[in-house]
């Protein structure tokens, strides 16, 4: 199939934001996306889903591209982000290991179960035709699912797309400008206290994203607002989600509130964020060295220098915050100066007793956030 003509059909249907991880079967479609659209190269497939999902909420019709081996990496956000939030997403997944087609041994099992996995995850799918006219008709069907806030995936067999040379890429190199390490004792406030400071500086141009577990639940208890989003699942994806929202809504202030267990799970997202470097995003890590939401088990963050890691990944500013006043000052300064910023704060294991869970359903959170974005351009 003529990849350029199919790509133009995608663009005519409004799909202009792409994120993914390379695959040899999809390389020509990926090359087209890089050449002609807004394409974000993710560190892994789960991050790509989170990036594209947030861009969808931000008003972009989004596409995610991956090899079927990477579909397993994307299971968590597909089942605990896309499904409960009812986020429309178009996907292309290759069929490495197709039965009867010689391939590498690591693809054999995945080739047999790719479509079964999609069905188990309630994802509508079709094999993408190599005939352009038929593929156009399939795209219309896929678009119908998208308009109903459903994901739709095309399964792509070997040799589906013809050659598209990759144009010379202009690499985006961002160097850290400010790094501040710990230089005095940490106040070690409770998470609720830190969240209260963060929330006190929110305005109607701000969107707050809270990571999985008690972070989202405590933010909900402070105030349930239409410009909050609580990541009830997809642990580790909040930073990538923030990137997608920041890129699709450059006029908004995107405040990402993360935890050590969450960030450790998908730390490659720091490199992606640093590369694309949205100046309207601030990434706040509240580190209590524990998986507190699941019983207080220790994480492995004790020896991890997150400030240096974020700086080396290209965050414009990377700062160790010692107390609540510093946290407030840094947030106020960021709102004035902007620039991709990483704030690191040590917190205690203390959390609220009888902590409530959000009464509002995830898809309702998504719907009202989209309304907020539309009503506050």
Image (tube, rainbow, N blue to C red):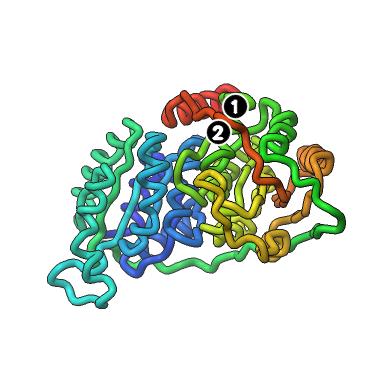
| Image location (x, y in percent) of residue 198 | 71, 35
Tags 2 and 1 in contact by the CB under 8 Å rule? yes
Q: Which residue lies furthest to the top in this view?
A: 375
Q: Which residue lies furthest to the right in this view?
A: 184
Residue closer to the observer: 76 or 65:
76
| Image location (x, y in percent) of residue 257 | 63, 43
On the rendered image, what quadrant is the C terminus found in?
Answer: top right
Which disc is residue 272 wearing?
A: none
Q: Identify the element where label 1 is drawn.
A: helix
Q: Label 1: how many residues lie within 10 Å, few (<14), some (14-19) or many (20+)?
A: some
Instruction: Decide if residue 20 is on the left or right side of residue 325.
Output: left
Q: Mark 2 points at which residue?
A: 217
- Residue drawn at the location 62% of the way across and 33% of the way down: 352
Q: In which quarter of the image is residue 113?
A: bottom left
| Image location (x, y in percent) of residue 330 | 80, 43
Residue closer to the observer: 244 or 114:
114
Q: Can residue 239 be seen in this view?
A: yes
Which disc is residue 221 wearing?
A: 1
- Residue drawn at the location 46% of the way across and 60% of the way down: 44
């Amino acid at each position: 199939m003529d990849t350029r003509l199919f790509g133009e059909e995608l663009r005519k249907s409004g799909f202009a934001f792409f994120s993914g991880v390379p695959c040899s079967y999809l390389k020509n479609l990926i090359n087209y996306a890089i050449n002609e659209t807004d394409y974000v190269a993710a560190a892994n497939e789960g991050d790509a889903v989170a990036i594209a999902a947030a861009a969808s909420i931000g008003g972009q019709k989004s596409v995610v591209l991956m090899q079927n081996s990477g579909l397993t990496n994307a299971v968590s956000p597909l089942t605990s982000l896309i499904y409960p939030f009812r986020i429309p997403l178009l996907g292309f997944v290759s069929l490495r290991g197709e039965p009867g087609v010689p391939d590498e041994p690591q693809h054999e099992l995945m080739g047999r179960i790719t479509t079964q996995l999609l069905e188990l995850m309630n994802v509508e799918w079709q094999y993408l035709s190599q005939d352009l006219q038929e593929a156009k008709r399939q795209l219309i069907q896929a678009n119908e699912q998208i308009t109903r806030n459903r994901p739709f995936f095309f399964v792509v067999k070997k040799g589906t797309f013809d050659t598209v040379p990759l144009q010379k890429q202009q690499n985006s190199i961002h160097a850290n400008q400010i790094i501040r390490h710990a230089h005095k004792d940490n106040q070690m406030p409770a998470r609720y206290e830190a969240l209260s400071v963060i929330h006190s500086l929110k305005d109607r141009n701000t969107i707050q994203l809270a990571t999985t577990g008690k972070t989202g639940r405590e933010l909900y208890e402070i105030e349930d607002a239409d410009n909050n989003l609580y990541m009830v699942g997809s642990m580790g994806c909040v930073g990538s989600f923030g990137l997608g929202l920041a890129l699709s809504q450059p006029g908004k202030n995107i405040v990402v509130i993360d935890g050590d267990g969450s960030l450790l799970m998908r730390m490659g997202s720091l490199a992606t964020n640093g590369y694309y470097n949205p100046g309207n995003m601030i990434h706040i890590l509240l580190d209590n060295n524990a998986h507190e939401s699941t019983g207080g088990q220790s994480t492995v963050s004790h020896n991890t220098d997150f400030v240096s890691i974020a700086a080396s990944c290209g965050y414009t500013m990377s700062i160790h915050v010692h107390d609540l006043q510093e946290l407030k000052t840094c947030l106020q300064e960021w709102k004035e100066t902007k620039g991709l910023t990483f704030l690191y704060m040590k917190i205690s294991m203390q959390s609220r007793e009888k902590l409530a869970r959000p009464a509002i359903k995830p898809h309702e959170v998504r719907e009202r956030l989209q309304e907020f974005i539309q009503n506050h351009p």
